[in-house]
Structure formats: structure tokens, C-alpha cells
């Protein structure tokens, strides 16, 4: 759902044209406008969660690809706090290679906003990988969660469960969907230059459906 920025003005004009006047009509117009915005934000937020769930269900490649095993890492009250949308293990030849922190962006605004934009998350994930004292915890979690999947026969479990001691690398990935892809296409050169200058180990992926992923 797209909300026109002039919705409030349109509401005001409609009330006036129909004979309504005074502060009461203004309040009603503002209320209606705020309700539309709230509904739009709710829809967008939950749409993003549905997309993340679909990606979680799709990326279960434990041969030569990504096996996503966890969603929404939360680590409060810590200066190394990082909240990637997903955690995955990258497999090659069926062997676990690295833990991948994944951020999913689904809208143009989410890419450019100063509080949650692409560069902010890149900086945050890189800082976490380089400075966090909790990386061994992430390795153990990958082992424990994937082991549980295998025992319970859930989430297309891998044949080989990662050994925490064998996971030597941490990588970053940005997965783009919907209008976030448009934003990336328009700003690709700037974003890639930022990644090169910072020497980030990060891949950008465009995701449109369960069968189509384009790596950059």
C-alpha cells in the first residue's frame, strides 16, 4: 500500500468542500491521516517479517550455499550489540565454512534512513565481527541450533552439523527485496565503493522469489 504525502491536505479539502469547517474538521482530517499512516506502517512492517520468514524457509542449502538457522539476534545492554535479521552458515562442498550475518532490506526508505540504512548495518556488523567478545557464543549457537534441527528432522537439516572450532570466518550479507532493489540499482556504485574502501567482507544479494537470487 502506498500513502500519498498529501493525504492530509486531501482530507482537509474534502471536509471543506462538503461544508465542514472549524477545528473539529481539522482534527478529524488529521486523525484519518494518522490512521492511514499507521495502517501503512503496520502493513510494511509485517510485510517485512513475512519476507524474512520466507527467506528463512527458502535458504536451507547445506551443500553449496547458505543455511539460515536463526532469526533476529538480540543482544541487549552490550556496546557490541548487533541485531542482524538472520544468522546463517555458508556451506561449500557440503562442509561448513563460515557464519554469515544477514541484514534484509525490503524498502527504499529502509536503505536510506539514518537509523537503519545500509551503511549503518554494514558498519555495525563489521564492528561486531572485529571487536565482539561473544563470537564463540555465536559458533556454539550455530552448532546447538542446527543439531536440534537434525534431531527433530526440522528445517531440512544439513548432513554435517558445524563444529564450533571449525567455524573460523564471519561474513556479512545484505539481502534486498522489493523497492530496496531499486534503491541499490540507483546507488550501486556508491555502495560498492563504500564496501571496497572499508574492506568489508560483504555480499549484496537481490531476492525476488524462492527460486531466484542474484549475487553481486
Image: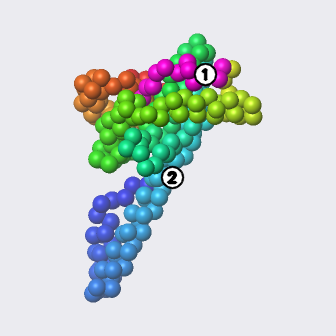
What range of the chain is rendered magenta? 160-172
Q: Is residue 110 above or below residue 141?
A: below
Q: Residue at x 27, y 26 (%)?
A: 198
Dot 2 lies on which element?
helix
Dot 1 lies on which element?
loop
Percent coordinates x, y for residue 85 in the rendering = 48, 40
For residue 166: magenta? yes
Determine which of the numbered discs, if any, sits on residue 163 in the image.
Answer: 1
Determine which of the numbered discs, if any, sits on residue 46 in the image.
Answer: 2
Percent coordinates x, y for residue 188 in the rendering = 29, 30
Percent coordinates x, y for residue 193 in the rendering = 25, 26
Q: Residue at x 39, y 40 (%)?
A: 80
Q: CA distance from mark 2 to mark 1?
A: 35 Å
What residue occupies the far top of the structure in this picture?
A: 93
> Does the rendering let one see residue 94?
yes
| Number of other residues with Cα within 10 Å of mark 1, as a class: few under 14, some 14 to 19, many 20 or more | few
Q: Residue at x 30, y 80 (%)?
A: 26
Residue 9 figure quarter: bottom left
Residue 91 figure quarter: top right
Are the two marked residues, 2 and 1, in contact with CB atoms closer than 8 angstroms? Answer: no
Q: Is residue 133 above or below residue 33?
A: above
Is 199 displayed left or right of 136 in the figure? left
Q: Quadrant of the C terminus?
A: top left
Q: Which is more toward the observer, 158 or 213?
A: 158
For residue 86: magenta? no
Amino acid at each position: 500500500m502506498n500513502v500519498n504525502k498529501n493525504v492530509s491536505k486531501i482530507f482537509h479539502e474534502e471536509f471543506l468542500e462538503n461544508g465542514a469547517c472549524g477545528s473539529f474538521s481539522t482534527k478529524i482530517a488529521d486523525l484519518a491521516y494518522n490512521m492511514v499512516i499507521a495502517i501503512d506502517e503496520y502493513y510494511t512492517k509485517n510485510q517485512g517479517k513475512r519476507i524474512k520468514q520466507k527467506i528463512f524457509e527458502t535458504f536451507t542449502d547445506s551443500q553449496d550455499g547458505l543455511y539460515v538457522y536463526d532469526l533476529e539476534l538480540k543482544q541487549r545492554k552490550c556496546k557490541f550489540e548487533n541485531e542482524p535479521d538472520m544468522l546463517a552458515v555458508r556451506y561449500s562442498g557440503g562442509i561448513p565454512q563460515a557464519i554469515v550475518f544477514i541484514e534484509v532490506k525490503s524498502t527504499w526508505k529502509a536503505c536510506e534512513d539514518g537509523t537503519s540504512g545500509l551503511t549503518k548495518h554494514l558498519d555495525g556488523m563489521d564492528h561486531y565481527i572485529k571487536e565482539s567478545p561473544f563470537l564463540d557464543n555465536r559458533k556454539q549457537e550455530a552448532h546447538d541450533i542446527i543439531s536440534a534441527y537434525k534431531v527433530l528432522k526440522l528445517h531440512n537439516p544439513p548432513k554435517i552439523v558445524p563444529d564450533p572450532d571449525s567455524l573460523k570466518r564471519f561474513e556479512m550479507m545484505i539481502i534486498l527485496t522489493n523497492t530496496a532493489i531499486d534503491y541499490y540499482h540507483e546507488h550501486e556504485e556508491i555502495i560498492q565503493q563504500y564496501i571496497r574502501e572499508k574492506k568489508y567482507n560483504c555480499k549484496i544479494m537481490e531476492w525476488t522469489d524462492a527460486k531466484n537470487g542474484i549475487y553481486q
